[in-house]
Amino acid sequence: MAGQLIYPAFIAIGFWWSEREPDLPDPAWFVDPDWDPAIRRRIIWHLQDSFRMPNEWMGYSWCRFRCETAEQDLTLLSTGEYTNGTFIWPEALLHYIQHHHVRLPDEVISHMLAHPPYLYRPLNQAPEYHLEWWKHQRGWQLGAESFYSPVDIGFLTIQQTDPGQVPAQIELLKRFLAGIRGRLHTIDRIIAGERVTINDHLKDYVNPFMHKASKVGLVVSFRRMTVTEAAAWHKERTGET
Ligand SMILES: [Zn+2]
């Protein structure tokens, strides 16, 4: 089980399943409430003391357990990646370990316990990231699931509350609604004061978007589709193409 790993490049860990990345593992498979608290604490320190990558790789992340903590503290699940020179992981991994009893695979734990993160010196060239090893991790909670339907398909309702911030509103909406059909018309309607509901496949940073929207005079609410609604929505979409 805890075999020797070869490191041709950074090994990505802690990236989780989503509708668009279905071959990544589910954090629910790794939950272990009985993990030795002393080791868990050392792993948390290791993650915190590691090197923060200058660039963002995968972007925003949302909590697969949909917890309140994540919605209140968006920075926890935001953009950074960290490395110890062998592994690379999203900033949000810490959240899963601290709040959801996620335990990392044995190979990762023994490596982290044996190699203090501050020994790593960043490379000049951009490193390669390999996800293959992580994709094959299955954890120990057979059949467990962290959530039951895609987080990013749903009904997003947007209404302008402050007509004095139109340029910032347009900029944010253009970025967030990129790829949504009828985007410019939708933005026009919102700017005209209309309460607009978008029923679409939205990017998985709905929560950070809502947070930003509230700062530029927009009120946004989001309701996920139920499983039945999502199935009907998919069917309708497939029929159209
Ligand atoms: Zn959470």
Image: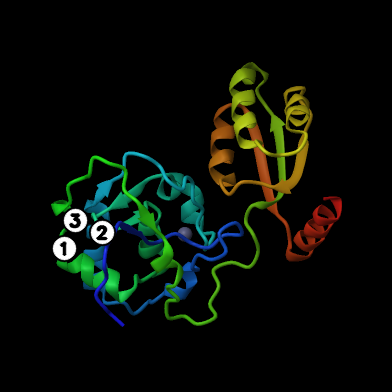
Q: Residue at x 22, y 52 (%)?
A: 49
> Which tag is nearer the camera, tag 1 or tag 2?
2
Looking at the rendered structure, the kind of residue marked 3 is: Pro
Report how far apart the C-alphas of labels 1 and 2 lie in the structure.
10 Å
Look at the picture and state if 75 lies above or below 167: below
**Considering only order in the chain, which callout, 2 or 1, is on the residue closer to the N terminus?**
2
Tell me the crowding category of disc 1: few under 14, some 14 to 19, or many 20 or more residues within 10 angstroms, Cα based.
Answer: some
Label 2 sits on residue = 86
Q: Residue at x 27, y 57 (%)?
A: 47
Marks 1 and 2: CB-CB under 8 Å?
yes
User: Mark number for residue 117?
Assistant: 3
Q: Residue at x 35, y 62 (%)?
A: 98
Front-most of residues 235 and 223: 235
Residue 228 falls left or right of residue 121: right
Marks 1 and 3: CB-CB under 8 Å?
yes
Toward which corner of the image does residue 53 lie, by quadrant?
top left
User: Mark number for residue 115?
Assistant: 1
Q: Label 1, secondary structure: give it.
A: loop
- Colour mode of the rendering: rainbow
Look at the picture and state if 7 lies above or below 81: below
Q: What x and y, as percent, mark residue 161?
A: 67, 27
Looking at the rendered structure, the kind of residue marked 1 is: His
Looking at the rendered structure, the kind of residue marked 2 is: Thr
Q: Label 2, secondary structure: give it.
A: loop
Q: What x and y, as percent, mark residue 103?
A: 35, 71
Is the residue indicated by label 1 positioned so its CB lies within 8 Å of ligand 1? Answer: no
> Which tag is nearer the camera, tag 2 or tag 3?
2
